[in-house]
Image (cartoon, helix red, strand yellow):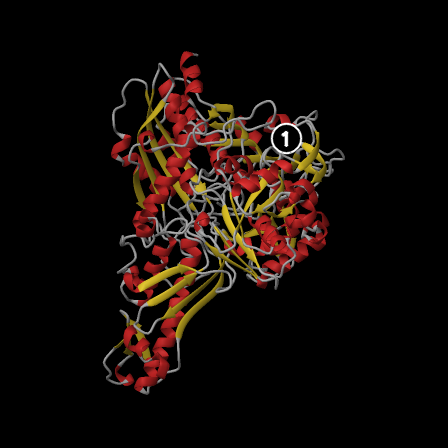
Amino acid sequence: MPLDAKPGMDFKVIGTRPVRPDGIDKVTGRARFGADFNMPGQLTGRVLRSPHAHARVKSIDVSQALKLQGVKAVVTRDDFNADAVDPALMDVLVNVMARDKVLYEGHAVAAVAAVDAPTARQALKLIKVDYEILPHVTDVEEAMKPSAPVLHADMFTDGVEPRPTKASNIASRVEFGHGDVEAGFQQADVIVEREFRTEAAHQGYIEPHAVVASMGADGYAEMWCCTQGHFMVRNISAHLNGVDVSKLRVTASEIGGGFGGKTTVFLEPVALALSRKANRPVKLVMTRDEVFRASGPTSSSYVKVKIGAKKDGTITGAYAELAYQGGAFRGSPVDMGAMCTYACYDLKNVQVVGYDVVVNRPKQAAYRAPGAPQAAFGVESVIDELAQKLGMDPIDLRLKNAARDGTKSSYGPTFGPNGLIQTLEAAKNHPNYKVKLGPHQGRGVAVGFWFNFGGQTAVSMNVNIDGSIALAVGTPDIGGSRASMGLMAAEELGIAYDKVRTIVADTASLGFNDVTEGSRVTFSSGLATVQAARDAIKKMCGRAAQMWGIPEDAVEWKDGHAHPAGANAGNFPPMSLADIAKDAGNTGGPIAGHCEVNAEGAGISFATHLVDVEVDPQTGRTQVLRYTVIQDAGKAIHPTYVEGQYQGGAAQGVGWALNEEYIYGKDGRLQNAGFLDYRIPVCSDLPMIDTVIIEVPNPGHPYGVRGVGETGIVPPLGAVGNAVSHACGHRMTVVPMSPPRSLKAIKG
Amino acid sequence: MVKVGLWGSLTSYTGGATHVEVAAGNIREMLLALGQNYPGLKPHLDRGVAVSINGQIYRDAWFQKIPEGAEVFLLPKLAGG
């Protein structure tokens, strides 16, 4: 989506750091999150979930629950017409309400709506589900064995010829690369080969999933929910319930974190079904326990990496094998992981093979750069070990092999301008890289890559009568996008930032918008905002031309004013945006700018992370001493938010690297479904995370923007792994590197 | 003609060829031609793919023109968090 770049890039508003527009609401409690919505006559919903990891659902008897006073509706699989569902959405339907089998502990089998929570809970106890318990498997490597219990009798591995005739848990095989890897290894002086494992981590958003759905007797419905994509929620919820899309209007609430975990539906179609049946508004809110057991964490993985290099550090061959479990359904991000595995390197001979595997766990959901961190953990660990064996500085080894403008990527396309080299050079020159380490301390370096993308986007910009601007976007704000959109609108219009109010509009008020994912919003909604501003400017120039009685093309827009363009246009004093807005009623009516676009041209993003840790030799506990994120943002629209994204990615990566993991018992049940036993980092676990913003403009955006939300979680597993390995004197190959694992490494 | 690079596991549907040539002026024409010439590819194309043209990845742009001699790769549809 090429747009003319802002001439000279002499920004006046972009790059400033105004106070966030949602800040006061959030710290005073005025902000309305998903669970804060309530309606008159609202019922309380609760979901009955499977206690078994794998079982056939022989029957569901809801008769006793329906007889309980105060119960207004019960829904099960029979309330969703699977025959009318698009095959592409069948897994979504099965995940929100089990059909012939339950596929993981926590899988929804029924839901009730009652006058209050105690009644709803009592009703769940009265629902009788007859299960035939089946063998289960929760480990990715176990699930790949021929002897493993098979989850889906109709799953035959895609991407393998001839097509297997026996069903298995391997949904697909993917492969990327080029050159001759074996020949590359033969040229190598040093080869390092290792196996790695990462456990599943949850996105850990603070706000649980919540929704209020209200369908009237006329079949029209409204919904309020916390989501990263309310247009997606509308389309899927309407489809699964056989409702016309236009009859469902969805409003996104303020969101208490998503990180990819709210890019799909869990409760929303069920709430709509309950509301339709009860003819009352229904509210469903997950408990934290349900969030862990029934919403998507990321994949656990097995990763094998083999890299060969010459004595001077030149990598001659690189191979990797990845196996990611996607929970009980196909669709783990192994393809993304496989493409990202060696994306940071300029390689002649490279091959990556990936396997998408199903297990009896909740359906995985995206988590910041889905699939990339697991692969990067393996590759960045082996690169570090290679540097040790070669006696090279780990940054120098990466610089020698780093991808740059013109590199043929490991997954095929040739890279354009990017900032990897700059991030590595900035890391090498950073003061944190020069700090002397003490006993039991170690330093780690790692790099990371993410694609970024654009997508369908609609923006509407209304010029108000007083010259202020109402900007409506359709992408939920999960990382400061309202501020960024406001800055871009102000920049383009030539007005002050505080003259723009940006809102996230509901699904009836704007054209379709893709989900807030893929680090796309500042890029694509920003691009659409700039375009909408230019549309409004064109109209305002037309109004000024009308007032002055000159041709429209004789008017130009500069610094928030319409000016006669050139001597022949006449000598008129400039008209401000406010002047034009004030008279809009007499010059043609309301003025608005619009943009509906499928934004393409998102720029790739690279980062380099540095971390110093100290591992307690008595307990194995790791303390992060210093952490530095250096990343290419293209152009930082609101630098504070960009830094926040860098810090947030690093903080979540540190948590994943050191403590966070899904622990399953032999019964296939999750053992640690709560923040007491699933430990995310708190402030005392982290130092102030230093950030460096590199700006190599993305040619696909008028201001050079690249997405920044995801790349930041790619390097931490590798960076922390390398640091802990050096501190322990032992190569760490399992994430998380929790105290027992580190202690074992130290004790040998 | 457009020379299209395929990710490894798709080569099983093209007789092992990592690159195939089809007559196409834009992405839609390219995808239709690939599905017709290599029926084994069609389910993968129907499931959704991304297309890289000269290093720029397109997710949903049927009518994006493919310049003569462009570097073109078929990629899995991107998803993000």
Residue depicted at x 51% and y 32%: A200
Q: Residue A680 in the image: state x and y as whole percent.
A: 41, 32
* Residue sitting at the far right: A165
Q: Amino acid at mark 1?
A: His
Write down the residue under mark 1.
A52
- Judged left or right of residue A567, residue A376 is right
As displayed, is residue A349 above or below residue A186? below
As displayed, is residue A281 above or below residue A185? below
- Of B46 and A231, the residue lying toward us: A231
Does residue A129 appear in the picture of this structure? yes
Mark 1, other Cα within 10 Å: few <14 / some 14–19 / many ≥20: many
Residue depicted at x 39% and y 69%: A462
- Judged left or right of residue B63, residue A393 is left
Residue depicted at x 62% and y 32%: A359
Q: Residue A265 in the image: state x and y as whole percent.
A: 55, 47
Kindly state the secondary structure of the residue where label 1 is placed: loop
The subunit letter for the residue under badge 1 reads A
- Judged left or right of residue A492, residue A730 is right
Q: Residue A235 in the image: state x and y as whole percent.
A: 58, 56
As displayed, is residue A116 above or below residue A504? above
| Quadrant position of residue B15 | top right
